[in-house]
Image (cartoon, grey):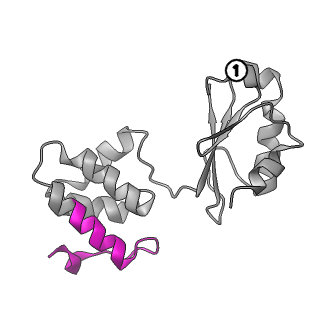
């Protein structure tokens, strides 16, 4: 049983390790198992800490560098903890012209949140993206799956208060 080799990690509970072990054992013999195992394990933990990557590689009997290579290649996988809510701010031309820079600055300052980062309490993660495909609503941001258009720097913090 793999549980004897479980590493310690503050974000991974015993229940999560059990679920991870179930995922590995159910999928390890299938072709292309690495991506499926990584995807399902990230769904359990929320991101891919090194200890989890090492554990997966051991369970699949392949090198840690191979698993890490797959995990770091695909943008679907994150090596850093993500917030409960993902804020995507459009930095494309239409949004830029209509003031997204000020909206972004307000978010960064209010939550001490750098672009590409996560708040200390893991409430928010912030990403700047080139286009959200909603130029007519500029400036635009998406929080989780909610699109917010015509966002002003004055109103953005009120919008974010709704997301705990």
Measuring from the top left, give residue 65's x and y in whole percent.
26, 50
- Residue at the extreme left: 29
Residue pictured at 34% horizontal, 65% vertical: 51
Secondary structure mostly seen in magenta is helix
**Quarter of the view holding residue 46:** bottom left
SS at mark 1 in the image: helix
Above-or-below relation of 162 to 120? above
Q: Is residue 37 covered in magenta?
A: no
Q: Nearer the viewer, residue 16 or 5?
A: 16
Above-or-below relation of 80 to 130? below
Q: Is residue 164 left or right of residue 54?
A: right
Q: Nearer the viewer, residue 146 or 151?
A: 146
**Quarter of the view holding residue 32:** top left
Above-or-below relation of 13 to 73? below
Residue pictured at 74% horizontal, 55% vertical: 162
Residue pictured at 59% horizontal, 46% vertical: 144
Measuring from the top left, give residue 29's x and y in whole percent.
9, 52
Q: Is residue 75 left or right of residue 66?
A: right
Q: Is residue 15 covered in magenta?
A: yes
User: Which quarter of the image is occupied by the N terminus?
Assistant: bottom left
Location of mark 1 (residue) = 135
Measuring from the top left, give residue 85's x and y in whole percent.
61, 53
Q: Is residue 4 left or right of residue 84?
A: left
**Which span is picked out in magenta?**
1-23
Measuring from the top left, give residue 109's x and y in whole percent.
81, 51
Q: Residues within 10 Å of mark 1 (few under 14, many from 20)?
A: some
């Amino acid at each position: 049983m793999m549980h004897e080799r479980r590493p310690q990690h503050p974000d991974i509970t015993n229940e999560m390790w059990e679920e991870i072990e179930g995922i590995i054992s159910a999928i390890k013999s299938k072709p292309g198992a690495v991506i499926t195992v990584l995807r399902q394990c990230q769904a359990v933990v929320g991101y891919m800490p090194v200890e989890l990557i090492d554990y997966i590689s051991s369970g699949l009997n392949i090198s840690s560098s191979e698993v890490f290579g797959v995990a770091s290649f695909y943008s679907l996988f994150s090596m850093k903890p993500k917030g409960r809510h993902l804020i995507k701010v459009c930095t494309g031309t239409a949004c830029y012209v209509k003031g997204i820079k000020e909206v972004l600055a307000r978010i960064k300052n209010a939550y001490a949140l750098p672009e590409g980062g996560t708040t200390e309490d893991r409430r928010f993660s912030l990403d700047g993206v080139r286009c959200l495909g909603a130029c007519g609503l500029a400036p635009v941001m998406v929080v989780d799956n909610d699109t917010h258009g015509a966002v002003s720097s004055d109103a953005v913090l009120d919008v974010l208060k709704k997301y705990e």
